[in-house]
Image (cartoon, helix red, strand yellow):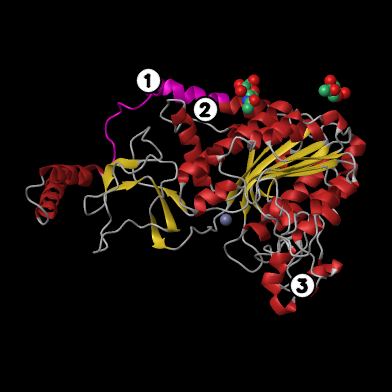
Amino acid sequence: MLRFGIQILLLTLAIAASAERDPHDFSFERLNRRNMLTNGMATDNSAVPTEELDPYYWRKMASVEIQKRLVEQPNTNRAKNVIFFLGDGMSLTTITAARILKGQRDGKPGEESQLAFEKFPYTALSRTYCTNAQVADSACTSTAYLTGVKTNILSLGVGPKVNYNDCEASMDPANDLTSLYDWAQAAGKSTGFITTTSLTHASPSGGYAHVANRFWESDTDVRTYLGDNYTTNCVDIATQLITEEPGRNLDLIMGGGMGKFLPKTMIDKFGNPGERSDGKNLLSEWQRRHPGGVLVSNRKQLQALNINQTTSVIGLFQSKLMNYHLHATEGEPTLSEMTETAIKFLSKNENGYFVFIEGGLIDYGNHKNTPGITLDETIEFEKAVELTRNLTSTEDTLIVVTADHAHPLSISGYPVRGNNILDINKISYDRNGVHYATLNYAAGPKQYLDESGKRLELEGQFGDADFVFPSYISTDDGVHSGEDVVVYASGPWQHLFGGVLQQNTLPHLMAYAACIGEGAKSCADMAVHS
Ligand SMILES: *[C@@H]1O[C@H](CO)[C@@H](O)[C@H](O)[C@H]1NC(C)=O
Ligand SMILES: *[C@@H]1O[C@H](CO)[C@@H](O)[C@H](O)[C@H]1NC(C)=O
Ligand SMILES: [Zn+2]
């Protein structure tokens, strides 16, 4: 009786509310009434896959999960190989939405789908803040997850005592941090990295560069940032990669950013001038230091690479960043193609290898508020992880997948099961009767408001992968967010990856599993027993 009374009251309110607007808009009145009664939720189950209608389906699924955990034996083998996958800006919502899109591309509702790394048996949370910032950038986080020490925002490979843009302090070896690259090299392992951004971008360089500003990518950049304080003592990131430890010892490096390695007087393989003011050709320098090394600059050359006869590889597939997978040129390899070559190449070393593989454009898609791009980049990243797990054994190869920081992307409202994740939520409305998308950002370039500040109806406007999704706060570019990110682990010592971890703990766990670096001390006992 009471419930009936409330419904009558809600109905009355609904009619009253809609009456204020347009009494002739019957569809709006009907929809708004429905909205008030069900909070805009889908109430029929026509989109539910048949098998899910049976409670047994859910009970069986749970029992399979329990069995899997009961038979699991701790894998305490030494990790001969460590493969570290980093999805830049790959927040948990990005992962959930990518999982849904993957399923929807297969013609399924999508929510039930699973990404390859979501099958990994162990997960942890990673706390991403930097020493002087609540919300991190990709430089301080790279320093944390590659060297094991948290540092200041925009800093790479130097400790938190070094101030932003302070050249002198950053060139003091006392402030240098060693990384997984150094530790693996000292143990006789092969090392390398792959990125879809540029070789001198923040994520890979936290492990090899030692700079007080991530933007010192070429000497021209250093001059721009230091102005009158510029001295040649201040070594740019590209030069550090080719001439200093541990960069110069890397066996394989691939990505974009050729311009940072060539003088302005030269035209690169893509028809663009180099960016360096000091006249140096760092690619000739690399070749001089790696006589058996091969430079590849397109997919054909990558596939033709004679892995057995090549001692080092540098791949540069664009002047600046590589293109999004959806916009890639014929000559640009995919992340999976680069990854496959890298794993085969690095596997030649009987002491094993450490490789860092970055899906760097996930972050760019999120900054542009284009989930059509971001989710596709995430699915490409996932393919590379799946391929890598297929090519390697859980007996001797630890794979860790994580993100550096999150993005304020939300999955909101109550869209019906299987609702296109890249479209409007068809059944939910705001207080003005205007639809909203399932995916929204906190900040970005487009709010889609009319002159009076009312949200515009966007139904029918989605569909292009480059469509800019709505955000709340008007900024030129989307921003990062500060919540924790997820870590997924598979292989030797996978069970160490659990709980809520500080991000800088990750390389220490990897080092322990591989018995390298600082990890070599703590795992010495374990080696004796096994
Ligand atoms: C490369 O070396 C591996 C291992 O020795 C061998 O199995 C493979 O056939 C070689 N490939 C080529 C193209 O020579
Ligand atoms: C990995 O192996 C599985 C099982 O054999 C296969 O279905 C899948 O296509 C493989 N994935 C890749 C990316 O090679
Ligand atoms: Zn970013």
Q: Which of the two residues, 83 or 279, is positioned nearer the viewer here? A: 279
To which residue does mark 2 refer? Answer: 62
Camera-nearest label, 1 or 2:
1
Measuring 13% from the left and 52% from the top, which residue is drawn there?
Answer: 18
Q: Element at badge 1?
A: helix
Q: Which residues are magenta?
A: 39-64
Camera-nearest label, 1 or 3:
3
Measuring 64% from the left and 47% from the top, which residue is drawn there?
Answer: 499
Callout 1 touching callout 2 (CB < 8 Å) = no
Q: Which residue, as the protein is rendered here, is positioned at the far right?
A: 528
As drawn, is 256 to the left or to the right of 66? right
Q: Give how far across and how far down residue 366 sits, in percent.
A: 50, 51
Q: Give how far across and how far down residue 167 sits, in percent.
A: 76, 72
> What is the three-letter code of the residue carrying label 3?
Cys
CA separation in Å, label 1 and label 2:
18 Å
> What is the three-letter code of the residue carrying label 1?
Thr
Quadrant holding ligand 3?
A: bottom right
Residue 1 in magenta? no
Which numbered dot is residue 416? Answer: none
Which numbered dot is residue 50? Answer: 1
Q: Quadrant of the N terminus?
A: top left
Upstream in sequence: badge 1 or badge 3: 1
Upstream in sequence: badge 1 or badge 2: 1
> What is the three-letter code of the residue carrying label 2?
Ala
Q: Is residue 124 visible?
A: yes
Q: Element at badge 3?
A: helix
Measuring 67% from the left and 63% from the top, which residue is drawn there?
Answer: 215
CA separation in Å, label 2 and label 3:
56 Å
